[in-house]
Amino acid sequence: MSIAERIQEAALARFALQGFESTSMNEIATDVGLKKPSVYGHFRNKDELYLSLLPLLIEAELAFAAQQIRGGTTVRKQLLAYLKGIRKRYEASYAVQFWTRALANPPGHIYDEVVQPLHGFMASLERIILDAVRDSELADNPGKVSSEHLAMTFMAMVDSLQSELVHGGTTKYNRRLKALWAVFEAATLPR
């Protein structure tokens, strides 16, 4: 692992646990076993370091989603597993904690630089979901909900659950997941 990757890994953990504002470049340097000027040799400032993490996390999250949500006869299980996985992955990974917090509350002074790639991510994730829904029994559901609307609804579920996890905690996340999934199933299950 290169020094820059080690710095990114340390920054990811600090940003996930402490947030952007509460993390210092000195803490990151100490975590990697470097002096602060060495960190600046790889990243001009904390903003650049934070922003350097986004493409890495976007790529990883889209690869995970594409592997998990493929369509076919088990699409309901795939979609539910992805939603349940939001909490499990959040609890197990600094990367997912950072990612979820960046989506929910990006640093204000670099808001536009954070949100622009996140919009691209959301569009790509929605495309993965739409392709999976079109290639499944959900495309011909009894409620006559279009594949596009099902994909957008699923995206709203993902947004809602991520927000609830960050701001409300696990218990509220579990309650919301149960309610959202019941409505999704009611719209798509054969009667």
Image (tube, helix red, strand yellow):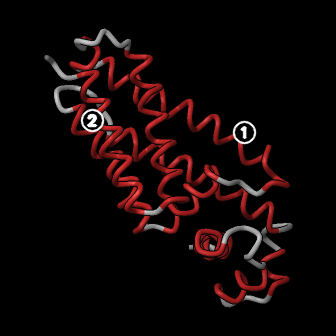
* Residue at the image point whose x is 15% and y is 18% from the top: 190
Q: Can you give x and y, in whole percent of width and height, for residue 86 in the image?
A: 40, 53
Q: Position of residue 170 (x, y in %)?
A: 40, 62
Left or right for 178, reference 28? left
Residue at 65% x, 75% y is: 18
Q: Which residue is mark 1?
A: 116
- Give the mark nearest the N terminus, 2 or 1: 1
Residue 181 vs residue 13, the one in the foreground? 181
Residue 97 image position (x, y, % from top left):
52, 63
Residue 14 - label: none
> Which amino acid, mark 1?
Gln
Say which element carries label 1.
Answer: helix
Question: Which mark is drawn over residue 182?
Answer: 2
* Left or right of 78, for residue 46: right
Where on the picture, by quarter, is residue 140?
Answer: top left
The residue type indicated by label 2 comes to: Ala
| Badge 2 element | helix
